[in-house]
Image (cartoon, helix red, strand yellow):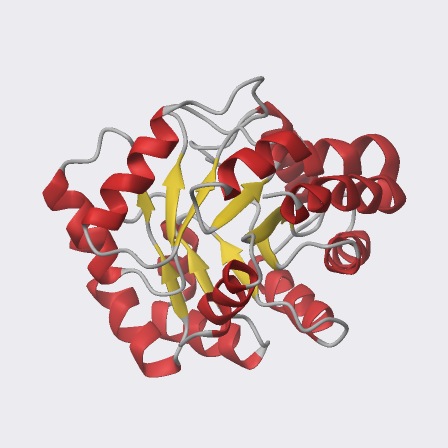
Amino acid sequence: MSSVEATIRTRVDAGSGALIGYLPVGFPSLGASVDAAVALVENGVDILEMGLPYSDPVMDGSVIQAATQSALADGFRLRDGFTAISAITAQVKAPVLIMTYWNPVVQYGVERFADDLAAAGGAGLITPDLIPDEGADWIAASERTGLDRVFLAAPTSTPERLRRVVDASRGFVYAVSTMGITGARADVDAAARGLIERLRAAGSTSACVGVGISTPEQVREVLGYADGAIVGSALVKALADGGVDAVGALALQLAAGKSAA
């Protein structure tokens, strides 16, 4: 069992589920992104999802796009992601996944990327634009290095697609709560609950819901039927507006949703 899946299982067995927090590497600076990630863990986040800034972030909403574009403008380079992961894992024990679009991995070299991520202490990748059918190179590299591979499932996914995602994923399946780009929403779509049920039927033992979660109440709601709740845009906005202290305070509030799940 991978460190990510073991962490999720520990939280589920404890009576709730896992809180997963997303932040972009390099925003508002490389050092601050490391400090912010550490603050998330210190305030109740169980698993970190660190995004690599990319010039064409097709899934990201305006808050995350603004942060990643700022990081790129400040000179972020892909190798900075490994520097950040090393610095984070030196300070906290929570698993750290990288969220990245596939093109940067290909440009860097799939095998080289896997080796450098493993050497930095990273747990694996979340790849929003890579489907299992086209992921043979990454599946092979992750098998060799023991890294997790988190593929996405959507409410519109066919039963066959869900089975492929479940079979190919390791760590957890990322269940997209609603169609469209990321961003905080007043309500997490009811489609998320149905998607989790379909993933269970397809054999998933670890499925986490993301996109649109921004409050302790939504964390509590999601953890009532899923293994984990993923929060991104709300944390990025807190970091942008109030710095490391603000993002840590929000993480503490969100973590309160676990205890009552």
Q: Quadrant of residue 166?
A: bottom left
Q: Quadrant of residue 137?
A: bottom left
Q: Where the C terminus falls, by quadrant?
A: top right
Rendered position, 120 above or below 49: below
Is 143 or 28 nearer to us in this picture? 143
Residue 135 seen in the current view:
no
Q: Quadrant of residue 67?
A: top right
Q: Can you name the residue that lies furthest to the top here?
A: 186
Residue at 25% x, 73% y is 140
Judged left or right of residue 232, residue 157 is left
Rendered position, 175 above or below 82: above
Residue at 72% x, 55% y is 44
Q: Position of residue 121 (x, y in %)?
A: 58, 76
Q: Position of residue 116 (x, y in %)?
A: 51, 76
Q: Position of residue 73 (x, y in %)?
A: 68, 39
Residue at 38% x, 67% y is 109
Q: Where the N terminus falls, by quadrant?
A: bottom left
Rendered position, 190 above or below 133: above
Residue at 89% x, 45% y is 245
